[in-house]
């Protein structure tokens, strides 16, 4: 069917037709010299009679057809003949990252990178590994912000994550439940067979956050797994104080809540006590969640530009014959 054709270079058709039509129109208006004259010119002229205007329009119509056929031919109309498919692994993933004030703490005195910096760097590594997946990111503290909806553009997503800074949003609270609802809403209309959320936090929900039952029930209804990563050492972590050096972070991680969220939704809970743990956890999730989808690896096209060029040459020959013989005298 004609509607199954596509153009390899459609821009040529869009830009070429107007330009070439102007050239054809210019030639029709200003170029009237005759190269060949036949004895029956007068007879054709007499026959034209009152239809002379119509006959003068014929060369322009021929030029229009020639120009159009050439432009379409150069744009390379083609039709897929054979498509090779393969099974690739791809799922939809929303990453929910805690950017509250406690994320500036660190857990290893020998590696004083903040929890925030470590989680951000490992998230970027994880994103780059998921070649066939659509990923998005939600950040939360007192506010909840979808920084990037689901996308296959890994470069854009990693650029966004790398620009995260503590203090971009109000970091005085931890709206964990609301953040999960925001991520679930992004996955609600996804057509992927497998959809997961990766929640990374180092605290517990604020008192004015919504009940954890809301995102749990929503995830169960939508068939979305939630993997929870709790960050925090047994010592509670440390903070670099501007005047007193290293000071303890007296923050408690709500391990029980994170376990309930993951278990109720079919995911898993992980506890990261060090930067190395976060890296290992992302690797485990990367290996756990795989889903096969059909994707084309090669498509063979059949080109149809040659018949158009032949047809264009025929009309061009008619146009030259007409404008240099019969119609040049009308």
Image (cartoon, rainbow, N blue to C red):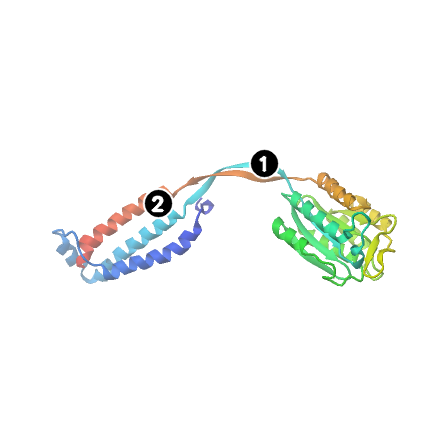
Residue 165 at what x, y percent from top left? 71, 58
Please tell me the numbered disc located at residue 307.
none
The residue under label 1 is: 86
- State the quadrant of the C terminus: bottom left
Residue 104 at what x, y percent from top left? 78, 56
Check whether the beta carbons of the residues at disc 2 and disc 1 lie within 8 A of each other. no
Neighbor class of circle 1 (other Cα within 10 Å; few <14, some 14-19, many 20+) is few
The one of 184 and 176 positioned closer to us in this rendering:
176
Neighbor class of circle 2 (other Cα within 10 Å; few <14, some 14-19, many 20+) is many
At a point 73% along the width and 41% down the height, the residue shown is 283
Residue 101 at what x, y percent from top left? 79, 59
Res 188 seen here: no
At a point 67% along the width and 40% down the height, the residue shown is 291
The one of 238 and 80 positioned closer to us in this rendering:
238
**In this image, 128 relative to 7: left or right?**
right
- Which residue appears farthest toward the left when viewing the image? 39
Residue 103 at what x, y percent from top left? 78, 55
Res 19 seen here: yes
Q: In this view, does 62 lie above or below 30?
A: above
Considering the numbered disc 2 on the image, is that residue within a helix, a strand or a loop? helix
**In this image, 91 relative to 260: left or right?**
left
At a point 23% along the width and 51% down the height, the residue shown is 320
The residue under label 2 is: 308
At a point 25% along the width and 55% down the height, the residue shown is 59
Considering the numbered disc 1 on the image, is that residue within a helix, a strand or a loop? strand
**In this image, 73 relative to 292: left or right?**
left
Q: In this view, does 256 lie above or below 210?
A: above
The span from disc 2 to disc 1 (Cα, nearest Å) is 35 Å
The one of 247 and 48 positioned closer to us in this rendering:
247
């Amino acid at each position: 069917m004609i509607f199954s054709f596509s153009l390899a270079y459609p821009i040529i058709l869009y830009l070429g037709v107007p330009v070439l039509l102007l050239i054809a129109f210019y030639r029709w208006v200003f170029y009237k010299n005759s190269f060949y004259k036949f004895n029956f010119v007068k007879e054709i002229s007499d026959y034209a009679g009152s239809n002379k205007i119509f006959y003068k329009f014929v060369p322009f119509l021929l030029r229009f057809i020639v120009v159009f056929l050439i432009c379409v031919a150069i744009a390379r109309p083609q039709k897929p003949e054979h498509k090779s498919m393969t099974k690739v692994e791809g799922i939809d993933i929303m990453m929910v990252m805690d950017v509250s004030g406690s994320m500036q703490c660190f857990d290893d005195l020998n590696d004083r990178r903040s929890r925030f910096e470590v989680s951000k760097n490992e998230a970027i590594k994880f994103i780059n590994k998921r070649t066939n997946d659509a990923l998005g990111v939600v950040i939360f503290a007192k506010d909840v912000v979808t920084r990037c909806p689901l996308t296959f553009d890994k470069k854009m997503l990693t650029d966004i994550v790398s620009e995260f800074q503590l203090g971009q949003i109000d970091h005085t609270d931890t709206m964990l439940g609301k953040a999960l609802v925001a991520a679930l809403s992004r996955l609600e209309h996804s057509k992927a067979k497998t959809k997961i959320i990766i929640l990374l936090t180092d605290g517990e929900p604020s008192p004015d956050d919504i009940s954890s039952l809301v995102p749990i029930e929503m995830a169960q209804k939508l068939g979305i797994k939630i993997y929870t990563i709790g960050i925090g050492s047994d010592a509670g972590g440390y903070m670099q104080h501007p005047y007193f050096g290293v000071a303890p972070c007296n923050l408690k991680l709500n391990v029980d809540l994170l376990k309930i969220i993951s278990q109720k939704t079919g995911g898993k809970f992980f506890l990261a006590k060090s930067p190395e743990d976060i890296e290992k956890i992302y690797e485990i999730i990367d290996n756990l969640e795989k889903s096969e989808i059909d994707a084309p690896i090669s498509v063979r096209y059949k080109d149809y530009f040659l018949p158009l060029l032949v047809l264009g040459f025929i009309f061009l020959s008619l146009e030259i014959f007409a404008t240099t013989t019969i119609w040049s005298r009308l």
